[in-house]
Image: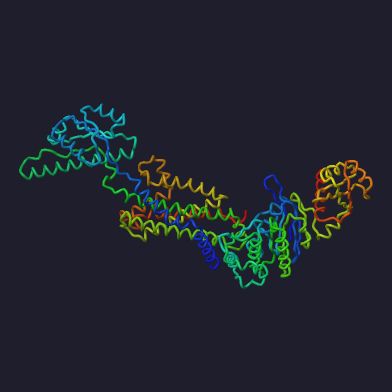
Amino acid sequence: MRTLRFLLQKEFIQIFRNKSILPIILVMPMVQLLLLSFAVDYEIKNIKLIFVDQDHSHFSALLQSQFTGSDYFIISGQTGQTQEAKNAIERGTCDLVVIVPPGFEQNLFRGGRADVQLIMNAIDGTKAGLSSSYATGIIRNYTKTLIENYRMRSNMGIAPQYKQIEANYSFWYNPELNYKVYMVPGILVLLVTMIGAFLSSMNIVREKELGTIEQINVTPIKKHHFIIGKTLPFWFIGMFEFAFGLLLARLVFDIPMVGSLYVLFSFAGVFLMVVLGLGLLISTITETQQQAMFISWFFLVIFILLGGLFTAIENMPAWAQYITKLNPVSYFIEVNRMILLKGAGFMDIAVHFAVISGFALAINALAIFRYKKVS
Amino acid sequence: MISIRGIGKSYGKIQALKDINIEVNAGEIFGLIGPDGAGKTTLIRILTTLLLPDTGSAQVMNLDVVKDFKLLRRDFGYMPGRFSLYEDLTVEENLELFASIFGTTISENYHLIEDIYKQIEPFKTRSAGKLSGGMKQKLALSCVMIHKPGVIFLDEPTTGVDPVSRREFWQMLHKLKQHGITIFVTTPYMDEASQCDRIALIQNGQLMSIDTPNAIVEQYKDDLYAIITDKRHGLLQDLRRYESAKSVFLFGSHIHYTDKQTQLDKPALNTYLQAHGHSQIEIRKIPPVIEDCFLALMGDLKEDAHA
């Protein structure tokens, strides 16, 4: 125990004597949270729209006015020909085409369904998805107004004459969602992952590079003491980092914290063990800090890009979705959002918890097995 | 104290050590002497449980370096060739760390390191990386000694150290010896052989001789001559071309020369040199030093290999 205490003390002295470590711990989360959260903004304005009105009725004009009145859309052309609008999409001068077919008003009044067609330029998938959801939202609103009108009229004794307009689109993105609330919990996870993986993977390798590990290896230090001494300080730093980032998120972005912070921090603690275990494993198989750096980067890039933060996991191809099942970062991002935004309790994330604990056990066992004091 | 039996080690195709057998007695300073790449560090790493031998076995203080490595690590001290303390910790923090790792305190064994540590104590709050080379060595030796080891292994402690610090360092070792500590030291400097009680000469992973420095010198059978002339340039080549020459080596400003005949024909050699344009020829019989022995043994080794 006494040895362990001294080892921990040594690590902390060394960490805080390193002049670049405090800025890394304190400034990095601020810059990343602020920069990324404001920059990665999925709200899109000025979507170029062509409204193809083939009905030329009062109600089609009403629908068009709803689009013109919206902040999201600017009308970039007017035509009665579907083909012409399609050409505009091909030329890239138009993002979205709304087609109101002939007989729109009639269909509506005959009590049947009225169809509206949306065609979008899906080269930029995110933009296309959002355009369509904004458009769908507008059409919904329009329908709602119509229904309210209809109720008013029916209350006044006028016979009901029209029903709901069906926008043929599945609703998969919430345009009302505040993206910062959505992004910040994910960015927090990246921060903790980076700090944990880099600091821990570089640490043992640094001792190899400097040759100090040679001196340590011939001492009777127990393997587990050495490994705990090497990882526990970074666990504390990672947890501090997470708490600090969460505080920033609360103060700057007013991120809701609906769920239990105990559950959140317990999960973060286990997650950090996975990251530190990975760092440890990397440092056992590399000889220089440069190698450790590159291997850490290799894993981090995969973890981050397949973590569900920048591309929704549901939008990935099936094989990539299987890979995300092995990605600890994707679990933490999901859990972070579930707890903070939805207020999920322990039972809701029990499966995530079990999986991440399994990862932690497996990777640390592997790392400890790989770490040898004799060559 | 240390017994090495038939140790061999290969790195791929390169045989770093071949059938090494050494017995080191308790309380002596034992020097392993050989040029770079001779296998000194490999042997010391095997003895310090950092490397597994391919063949043979070794015991340090009756503990096997492979089987009992855990027990053994409590009882010896090892100073690697490269400075291996924490440069970002202070002098005192380093010493404290190593004391606590071995479950002891600085005050408990202070008497062992007092002579050495006293000299660097004024700088105890300075980080180890900012010490001079000589002071780093004193700190390293203090850290190695702080847990009162029975044996210490020093890998080329004097390489890259100035002559004054080198002499000081050997004085420190002699003082440690008085505390009853066995010292196993490697060095590429032949002139340090006389500082050791016994030495082993090693070359290309093979031991050539183990004995006291004096005995090794006494085994030198040939008459050795130091030759110098006014024309330094070309002297080495001229002597090597001399028919009766057995060995010709450059030693600073002199040439060390042995002859094939048991009795050197000085006038003949003189005439030969004069014929090649040398004057002020000085041929002096000298006692051999360890380096002469080393070179002679190396020659024997080559002849064995060719035979």
Place residue B122 in its image quadrant.
bottom right
- Numbered label tally: 0
Q: Nearer the viewer, residue B214 or A277?
A: B214
Q: Decide which of B223, B28 is in the foreground and name it.
A: B223
Q: Quadrant of residue B163?
A: bottom right
Residue A116 in percent (x, y) is at 21, 34
The answer to whether residue B33 is visible is yes
Residue B28 x, y percent position in the rendering:
75, 65
A166 horizontally vs A44: left or right: left
> From what the image shows, is residue B45 above or below residue A78?
below
Q: Residue furthest left?
A: A157
Give coordinates of residue A149: x percent, y percent.
Answer: 11, 43
- Residue B307 visible? The answer is no
In the picture provided, is A207 more to the left or to the right than A38? right
Residues B14 and A364: in front is B14
- Between A205 and A223, the one nearer to me in the picture: A205
In this rendering, would B78 be left or right of A368? Answer: right
Residue B278 picture quarter: top right
> Is the residue B228 above or below the residue A65 in the image?
below
Residue B219 is situated, as x and y percent measured from the top left of the image, at: 86, 56
